[in-house]
Amino acid sequence: MLLPTSIIAVLPGTWPAVNVPPPANANYTKLVNISKIRNAPTTKPNATTPTCPTTDTYCYWTCSLCTRNDTDIVNCPNKLDWGLTLDDGPTSFTTSVLDYLDTQNVKVTFFVIGSNVYQNPDILLRAFKAGHQIGVHTWSHTALTSQSNEVVIAELKYTLDAIKAATNVTPKYMRPPFGDYDDRIRDISTQLGMKPTIWDLDTNDWLSNDDKSFQLSWITANFTQWVSDPALKTTGHISLEHDLYNQTAAQIPLVVPILKKANYSIKPVHECIGDPYPYVENVTLAKATTTTTTTTTTQAPTPTPEITPTQPNVVTTPTHTQKTSDATIIFKSDLLSLSFVVVLFFVSLFY
Ligand SMILES: *[C@@H]1O[C@H](CO)[C@@H](O)[C@H](O)[C@H]1NC(C)=O
Ligand SMILES: *[C@@H]1O[C@H](CO)[C@@H](O)[C@H](O)[C@H]1NC(C)=O
Ligand SMILES: *[C@@H]1O[C@H](CO)[C@@H](O)[C@H](O)[C@H]1NC(C)=O
Ligand SMILES: *[C@@H]1O[C@H](CO)[C@@H](O)[C@H](O)[C@H]1NC(C)=O
Ligand SMILES: *[C@@H]1O[C@H](CO)[C@@H](O)[C@H](O)[C@H]1NC(C)=O
Ligand SMILES: *[C@@H]1O[C@H](CO)[C@@H](O)[C@H](O)[C@H]1NC(C)=O
Ligand SMILES: *[C@@H]1O[C@H](CO)[C@@H](O)[C@H](O)[C@H]1NC(C)=O
Ligand SMILES: *[C@@H]1O[C@H](CO)[C@@H](O)[C@H](O)[C@H]1NC(C)=O
Ligand SMILES: [Zn+2]
């Protein structure tokens, strides 16, 4: 139910149970100086109906859409830049999205779930090699503000590890599931080397999975409206869609032409904010070549390596490997919280 994806491959090694918050790992906790984390209260574990404070001391986006200009990426600054972001993959539906983006020579940003990376590492590697930006979207897609510091660290670090294991790079950008973040989550993310990246335009495409009154045509209608809205002409934008479901992934070939026709330049988020290094490692990224529009060829992009690691393994090797017996214990100790999390997933779905 959570993963509408055929399992193509599984990352080697021992990993936490999928789709539940991973256990705290002391090796990871010590990567963060807890005393430097702003002490926002842990929220109730319900992303759809948060308990909102009367004063927004900790800039809690879920309640106030508050963002911090020193850490958060909110939009693309240049008027005609569009950061197309796709969350919750990689899934089997990501493949058709990648096929389409290749034909268009368009690069986007994927914020990926560690549990899905574990199950689809080959698809993630393909997205990375094609030059798309890979960012962190946690291990289990939990509402981060509802979790302890230690579990938030584990959610982020295990996902960094999974991405590193699949692609050999370490992302510098993360997106909190449900946009659920506050200063505590900002500080943990920043100390782990990642900038929080939110969106300014939301398709709500994920609603289409359970809400039968949701019309898929609203997604393209939203894009058509956004590109013609005078109020949206002063900056570029970051839009939110999902490659988690077949029907939402299938919208990408419909929205890209709308943006192109409106003269928007679709870019990975790191590129639109002027950061040539989306990863800790210094890798040369495949760029969208603007010259292809003047050629008449329709051939697929060259299969030669597009990513050249120029400085591999700058970061230390992940220390995630656990004994199988540890993993078994983790599974058992998580059974109680598992039943709760299943309820949470049914209630709050994926954003
Ligand atoms: C922490 O790191 C040590 C040394 O690498 C390792 O033996 C231990 O298994 C790790 N603990 C966990 C929970 O990963
Ligand atoms: C953690 O941060 C505090 C406050 O800035 C500082 O005093 C302390 O030395 C730091 N600890 C470590 C291990 O870096
Ligand atoms: C960033 O936010 C702070 C606090 O709200 C504000 O004082 C400052 O002017 C802002 N800086 C920029 C560059 O917008
Ligand atoms: C945009 O999408 C929302 C649902 O997220 C929908 O209510 C609205 O009607 C759409 N706008 C257009 C112009 O279709
Ligand atoms: C996915 O969506 C496409 C386009 O709407 C459709 O043709 C295809 O049958 C769907 N595949 C699955 C597995 O649902
Ligand atoms: C896009 O750019 C072309 C070439 O500069 C121009 O002719 C056209 O009017 C522009 N379209 C829009 C929607 O701005
Ligand atoms: C990254 O590698 C390129 C090519 O080797 C080099 O020109 C550039 O200075 C490097 N950048 C950083 C930040 O290390
Ligand atoms: C989330 O909030 C809704 C509405 O208040 C409530 O019905 C639901 O039981 C809550 N779910 C959890 C997991 O607390
Ligand atoms: Zn998500």
Image: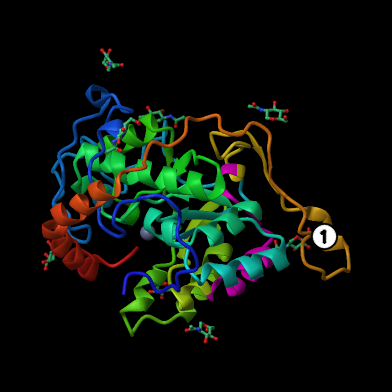
Q: Residue at x 45, y 65 (%)?
A: 242
Residue 326 x, y percent position in the rendering: 24, 46
Towards the viewer: 268 or 95: 95
Q: Which of the pair 137/269 is nearer the observer? A: 137
Looking at the image, which residue is at 15% across and 56% down? 332
Q: Secondary structure at mark 1?
A: helix
Q: Is residue 254 magenta?
A: yes
Residue 275 on the magenta span: no
Q: Which quadrant of the figure has residue 208?
A: bottom left
Task: Report if residue 235 is visible in the image.
Answer: no
Q: Which residues are magenta?
A: 250-270
Q: Position of residue 136 (x, y in %)?
A: 43, 48
144 relative to 270 in the view: left or right? left
**Quadrant placement of the N terminus:** bottom left
Q: Is 290 left, or right, of 94 in this rendering?
A: right
What x and y, as percent, mark residue 201?
45, 58
Identified by mark 1, the residue type is Thr
Write the residue at 15% across / 39% down: 41
Residue highlighted by disc 1: 292
Question: How does the figure colour the protein chain or chains?
Answer: rainbow
Residue at 46% from the left image edge and 64% from the top image edge: 241
